[in-house]
Image (cartoon, rainbow, N blue to C red):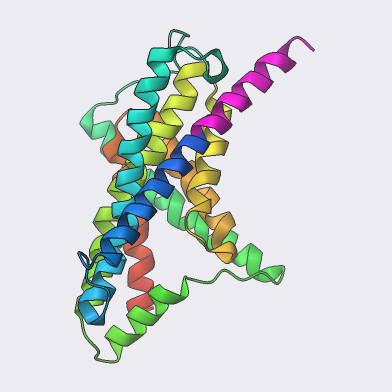
Amino acid sequence: MSDAPKLGARLRAGVLEVGLAIFGLLIGTVLFWVLGALGLLPTEGALGRGVQMAAGPGITLVAALSYRALNKYIDASENPMLGSPREKPAPFTRASVGVALGIATLGIGAAIGGSFVLGLGLEAVGAPVAEQGTIVELVEGFKAGGDALPFVMLAISAVALAPMAEEFLFRGLVFRRIAERSNALPEAFVLSAAAFASIHTNPAGFVIYIWLGLVFAESYRRSGRLWVAMLVHAGNNAFALSLLVWG
């Protein structure tokens, strides 16, 4: 019974952190919509499709910067509902570069292998995983000899821009902040992974995204280096994209 209030406080703080991240995503989405409406971003043709591929990471980066700015204000106000930054932080020990590379290699294997096993399980119960329609359309268009620019932007976004922006927001900020403010590591894993899965708007792949979010977070926790989570994320995306192109 004595742990119930503490658990409730940790969950409340974690949910509020996720809410701030979602609010940041809303800010980024509105900003890109306004830029498009003003004609400052191309929306038609191959160039427009290419820009659309980079919009997701761009929105996520705006969300991360907004989230960090909002939390500076919250920390200054010391709102007790959001936990205390003076509490004992969860451990994030920095591994050596060699060990970090080993963790990244294991993380890529876990991300790909776990996704494969989960995919088989979901297919067995009649809920097969499907890739997002826009991505499949761009890949098929490229394979059929269409304009290469949208596919090139898709590849750059999937293998570089998205891993950097999403790991910065969901692991470097949301995951670490939930864990450190209330020493709430389980809540940090679950809430950051759920938020990460939700932004991909792919219900058929939600379970896979949850798994990937957990793997990326664990890679970051074990290494103490955000670039490791980015590398694991990039490796997983590169493998998935290669399957769409050559598989």
Name the residue at the bottom extreme: 144
Q: Residue at x 32, y 71 (%)?
A: 242
Number of marks drawn: 0
Residue 13 forms part of the magenta stretch: yes
Residue 49 sits in quarter? bottom left
Name the residue at the right extreme: 1
Residue 230 sits in quarter? top left
Magenta stretch, main secondary structure class: helix
Q: Residue at x 57, y 57 (%)?
A: 206
Q: Is residue 92 visible?
A: no
Name the residue at the front extreme: 38
Q: Is residue 186 visible?
A: yes
Q: Nearer the viewer, residue 89 or 243?
A: 89
Side of 236 relative to 4 (left or right): left
- Please provide the residue range marked out in magenta: 1-17
Residue 138 x %, y %: 34, 79
Residue 103 x %, y %: 34, 38
Side of 225 relative to 9 (left or right): left
Above or below residue 190? Residue 83 is above
Q: Residue at x 26, y 54 (%)?
A: 161
Q: Nearer the viewer, residue 240 or 191?
A: 191
Q: Nearer the viewer, residue 48 or 85?
A: 48
Residue 104 sits in quarter? top left
